[in-house]
């Protein structure tokens, strides 16, 4: 009896994951033919809450690509890999408290936020220095992950109070 409930619960979780994966995939399936441009896979994976490194993303793509790469990924090859990644909690993003402490490195005045102008300045004028400071912090606490990818792509998200 308990095993049946567990199986039903697992099936419900997998069905919900499949629904989310399909929705994310369809956003980039511009021709509605169950394929997406291989260059969109990272965006799809990140939209599902995963944060693979560039190496992990490359490995993922190699797994789901056709033997003769076409530049497109088919949904039927993508869904089992993505489902497994989500169930196994692969490519987990940086914990919020670790991310917060990393940004505190860039906020020596301890105001608790970075303005858009400050963040743009760090990324354009002091990019290497800022990334170096953050990476020094992260190397002690976390494997090399997507913080360095997140920073330039999330300016609107980060411009408020952290």
Image (tube, helix red, strand yellow):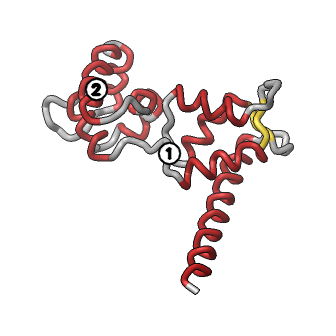
> To which residue does mark 1 refer?
90
Write the residue at 37% across / 23% down.
Answer: 120
**Residue 49 horizontal side relative to residue 7, left or right:** left
Q: Residue furthest left?
A: 109
Determine the CA span between mark 2 and mark 1. 23 Å
**Whole-percent x, y for residue 146 in the image:** 43, 33
- Marked residue nearer the N-terminal end (2 or 1): 1
Write the residue at 51% across / 47% down.
Answer: 49
Write the residue at 29% across / 18% down.
Answer: 132
**Residue 93 horizontal side relative to residue 86, left or right:** left
**Residue 89 horizontal side relative to residue 57, left or right:** left
Which quadrant, please, contains the N terminus? bottom right
> To which residue does mark 2 refer?
134
Q: Relative to the observer, which residue lies in front, 55 or 111?
A: 55
Query: Which image quarter: residue 147?
Result: top left
> Is disc 1 placed on a helix, strand or loop?
loop
> Is disc 2 placed on a helix, strand or loop?
helix
For the residue carrying disc 2, how many other residues have a C-alpha within 10 Å: few (<14), some (14-19), or many (20+)? many
Q: Residue 122 got which mark?
A: none
Q: Relative to the observer, which residue lies in front, 162 or 34?
A: 34
**Whole-percent x, y for residue 144 in the image:** 38, 29
Which quadrant, please, contains the C terminus? top left
**Residue 121 against residue 105 in the figure, above or below:** above
């Amino acid at each position: 009896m308990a095993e049946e409930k567990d199986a039903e619960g697992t099936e419900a979780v997998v069905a919900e994951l499949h629904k989310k994966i399909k929705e994310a995939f369809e956003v980039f399936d511009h021709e509605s033919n169950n394929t997406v441009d291989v260059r969109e896979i990272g965006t799809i994976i990140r939209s599902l809450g995963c944060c693979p490194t560039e190496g992990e993303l490359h490995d993922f793509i190699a797994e789901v690509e056709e033997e003769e790469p076409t530049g497109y990924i088919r949904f039927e090859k993508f869904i089992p890999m993505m489902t497994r990644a989500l169930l196994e909690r692969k490519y987990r993003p940086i914990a919020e408290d670790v991310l917060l402490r990393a940004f505190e490195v860039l906020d020596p005045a301890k105001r608790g936020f970075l303005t858009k102008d400050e963040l743009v300045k760090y990324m354009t004028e002091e990019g290497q220095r800022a990334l170096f400071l953050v990476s020094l912090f992260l190397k002690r606490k976390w494997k090399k992950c997507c913080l360095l990818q997140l920073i330039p792509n999330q300016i609107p998200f980060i411009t408020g109070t952290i």
